[in-house]
Amino acid sequence: MKLQNNIALKEWAVVLKAVEEGKQTILLRKGGIAEENGEFKPEHSEFFLYPTFEHENPQAIKPDWRPRLAAIEKENKDPKRIHFRLCAIADRVEKVTEWEVAKRLIPFTVMSDEAVEKRFNYGDWPGFYVFIIRAYSLAVPWDLPVKPAYEGCKSWVPLETSMFTAGSMAVLPEGVWPYTRDKISKVIHA
């Protein structure tokens, strides 16, 4: 992992809470991907996770996570600050274009069935990219001011400040990570 980085990927705050707790290791994305020699790669393979509330609503979250939304919002929703607690490495990226495959991923996310289906059907092509990420808790969380360049509906955000990752701890222990990653890959390729 890079010792310092200034790239962040926006994702729903509730999804990032699930990542932080080790309950989710995938991100379902429509963009921010390049294809190289038949392989899908994110624009950036290492990044901070930027909690956002854009397009997030209670109906887009599984019912058992909805009671936690208020606390997660309180923890993250300062209109002038961004609270970074996680960084990640995109271990693999898979393109999923069949709904039957996408449905098999629903147990691996806190997004509701309807939200997964909506994301799958959004835009000019059916499907999404599955980022299988290895998440790390920052040894020292970062709190940065929101800048106009960070706002809006975009996936990748180049931050004006580079942040350090030294001392970050893997959310999933070394022995658990390969099993989790491989299980998701098998679900995609079953």
Image: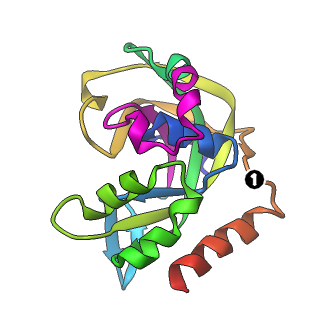
Query: Is residue 60 a member of the stretch shown in magenta?
Result: yes
- Near-viewer residue (10 or 116): 116
Q: Report the amino acid beneath label 1.
A: Leu
The one of 152 and 15 positioned closer to us in this rendering = 15
- x and y, in percent, of residue 63 in the image: 53, 41
**Magenta segment, which residues?**
46-72
Q: Work out whether 106 lies above or below 18.
A: below
Look at 48% across and 58% down and name the residue there.
Answer: 45
Where residue 175 appears, x then y in whole percent? Answer: 84, 64
Q: Look at the image and tell me whether residue 168 can be seen.
A: yes
Q: x, y (%) of residue 150?
A: 30, 30
Residue 42: quadrant of the picture: bottom left
- Whether residue 32 appears in magenta in the rendering, the answer is no
Element class at badge 1: loop
Identified at 51% across, 61% down, the residue is: 106
Q: Which residue is mark 1?
A: 172
Pinpoint residue 97: horizontal percent, then vertical percent.
Answer: 33, 76
The answer to whether residue 5 is seen in the rendering is no
In the displayed structure, does residue 2 sit left or right of residue 115?
Answer: right
